[in-house]
Image (cartoon, helix red, strand yellow):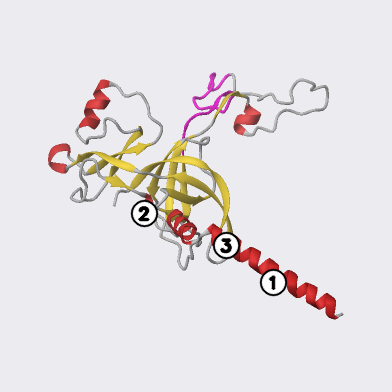
Amino acid sequence: MTTGMIGRKIGMMRLYDGSGRVRGVTVIELGPNYVTQVRTPDRDGYSAVQLAFSGRRKRLTSPQRGHLRAAGLERETLTALKEYRVDDTAGYSLGQVLDCGQFEPGTYVDLTATSKGRGWAGGVKRWNFSGGPKTHGQSDRHRAPGSLGAGTTPGRVYKGQKMAGHMGDEVVTVLNCLVVASDPTRNLLFVQGSVPGARTAIVSVRNARRPALKAYIPPVFPTTAEIEEAVAETDPVEDVEAMVEQDSVATAEGDESEATE
């Protein structure tokens, strides 16, 4: 089992777990992931597995196509590559396909993605500054940052001072997000809470250090295979004929009751 996988953010929804508690979840299309490289201690000095996420096709350079040709994936619709550490690489091979079944409901994961870019923002929006006073003639200081530092000592502005600047569009990690449900048949992972980034953003999902939730009851919802099987077993023509027959019987019974009265 790898320590993480690559996915794509789809959106948010509400989901009821097995105990009836409503949870706001983010839906992540987690997989399929392909093994594109296996690193071993003898050759590379550590054990790791490089995975590729199958999503919208990107233009590949010649070195990238040559790298993926070894795994037979140069023609796949690959979007992102990422490497994850593993304890043992014995169970992995080039071109192997992984799904989200390794993330069980009730466990916790860490999510890493690029946040939405907000452009150039002032101190009030970027750092939640309160702004200047709105009285005593301060007519133009409502959203001003105020003083940045002393003049004599140190005589300059410290690096990292909170000021106006580029907001967002940076790598953000959210820790300890509960896995509410997992659907390997559709490659969907339902994670409680919000995930950085816009829709279709690439998300890295890793196993968290937090222990799994005790006595957690996952939601029960039909899978795609179960829905298709239920539809296949139902004959719409027979159902319509049965409904028409029931309606005719009910109408006849109603006429007889009216005649008796």
- State which mark lies toward you, 3 or 1: 1
Q: Is residue 68 left or right of residue 132?
A: left
> What's the magenta region?
152-172
Q: According to the image, label 2 marks what residue?
A: 101
Q: Amino acid at mark 2?
A: Gly
What distance separates the C-alpha of mark 3 from that of mark 2?
37 Å
Q: Looking at the image, which residue is at 36% across and 54% down?
A: 101
Question: SS of the residue at dot 2?
Answer: helix
Q: Is residue 211 left or right of residue 35?
A: right
Q: Name the image quarter holding the C terminus.
A: bottom right
Q: Where is 259 relative to 241, above or below? A: below
Q: According to the image, label 3 marks what residue?
A: 239
Does residue 149 appear anywhere in the picture?
A: no
Q: Amino acid at mark 3?
A: Asp
Question: SS of the residue at dot 1?
Answer: helix
Secondary structure predominantly adopted by residues drawn in magenta? loop
Corner quadrant of residue 39: top left
Tag shown at residue 249: 1
